[in-house]
Image: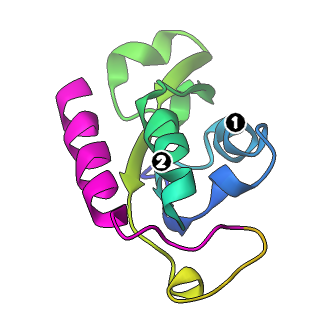
Amino acid sequence: MRLPFDAHNHVHLGPSSALSSLLSGGSLQGMAIMSTHPQDFERVARLARQVVTSPVHAEQRKDKEQKDSSVCTMKHNIIPCFGVHPWFLGSDSTDHPPLESNWIEKLTYIIWKQHLIR
């Protein structure tokens, strides 16, 4: 059985337990986490580097070798997506500081660093 993939979320803005609770129980095969502002680029990158596993019942696995045990673990695919949410472009939000003029350079650095780590 192929599990769903969450293609757009901002789970990093919620409580720290949100990511593991979304992935626990094997209900998702992974997710794309969208940054919203340069302030959260590093957090999104850090979450994507984490190896997230959760228990999965063997009948949900497609690789037959693992079916001898009733529960195994599944690695989740977490894809980081970097950018600025349109809500923060040109706004003076109280939750986020105004965009710095060099935010694109910071974004380029984060993406490059992310690529080197993987």
**Majority secondary structure in the magenta region:** helix
Can you identify the residue that label 1 sits on?
Answer: 20
Q: Nearer the viewer, residue 112 or 24?
A: 112
Residue 14 horizontal side relative to residue 98, left or right? right
114 vs 91, nearest the viewer = 91
Q: Identify the magenta region.
A: 96-118
Number of residues whose C-alpha sits closer than 10 Å to that of mark 2, classed few (under 14), some (14–19) or many (20 or more): many
- Residue 39, image x, y percentages: 56, 54
Instruction: Label 2, secondary structure: give it.
Output: strand
Label 1: element kind: helix
| Marks 2/1: CA–CA distance | 11 Å
Disc 2 target residue: 30
Magenta-drawn stretch contains 107: yes
Q: Is residue 60 visible?
A: yes
Can you give x and y, in whole percent of width and height, for residue 112 in the image? 19, 42
> Which disc, if any, is residue 60?
none
- Left or right: where does residue 75 sit relative to residue 28? left
Quadrant where the C terminus sits is: top left
At label 2, which amino acid type do we have?
Gly
- The residue sitting at 54% across, 67% down in the picture is 36
Pick the residue in front: 77 or 104. Answer: 104
Q: Position of residue 52 (x, y in %)?
A: 53, 28
Q: Earlier in the sequence, mark 2 or mark 1?
A: 1
Q: Quadrant of residue 110?
A: top left
- Residue at the location (32% across, 56% down)? 107
